[in-house]
Image (spheres, rainbow, N blue to C red):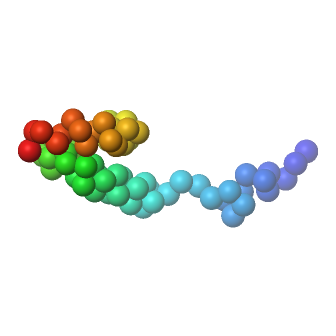
């Protein structure tokens, strides 16, 4: 039987809440830079934010005329 060292946090770090919040904040800033209104971004879920960032050019074109 193995000792379980391969999956130890020192070998393979666990996801941390602080890093998750940092990533979410960066993603929100990216959407704001693409032209999405702040009120709209605040109401979105993180899943929706990530989905919009998959195709940034499409988002930029979508919100370009709605300012």
Question: Which residue is nearer to you in this view: 18 or 35?
Answer: 35
Vertical placement of residue 11 versus 49, above or below: below
Q: In screen coordinates, is 34 left or right of 26?
A: left
Q: Residue furthest left?
A: 67
Question: Which residue is nearer to you in this view: 50 or 10?
Answer: 50
**Where the N terminus falls, by quadrant?**
top right
Q: Residue furthest bottom?
A: 10
- Residue 23 lies, in percent from the top left, at 40, 56
Residue at 25% across / 43% down in the picture? 60
Give the quarter of the image for residue 18.
bottom left
- Residue 3 lies, in percent from the top left, at 85, 53
Vertical placement of residue 51 versus 27, above or below: above
Question: Which residue is nearer to you in this view: 52 or 56?
Answer: 56
Q: In screen coordinates, is 21 left or right of 4?
A: left
Whether residue 21 appears in this view of the structure is no
| Numbered-mark total | 0
- Residue 53 lies, in percent from the top left, at 36, 42
Vertical placement of residue 4 versus 47, above or below: below
Residue at 31% across / 53% down in the picture? 30
Question: Which residue is nearer to you in this view: 3 or 30?
Answer: 30
Residue at 78% across / 53% down in the picture? 6
Q: In screen coordinates, is 55 left or right of 16?
A: left
**Where the C terminus falls, by quadrant?**
top left
């Amino acid at each position: 039987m193995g000792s379980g060292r391969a999956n130890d946090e020192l070998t393979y770090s666990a996801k941390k809440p602080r890093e998750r919040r940092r990533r979410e904040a960066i993603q929100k800033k990216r959407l704001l830079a693409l032209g999405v209104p702040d009120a709209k971004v605040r109401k979105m879920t993180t899943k929706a934010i990530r989905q919009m960032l998959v195709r940034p050019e499409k988002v930029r074109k979508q919100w370009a005329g709605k300012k």
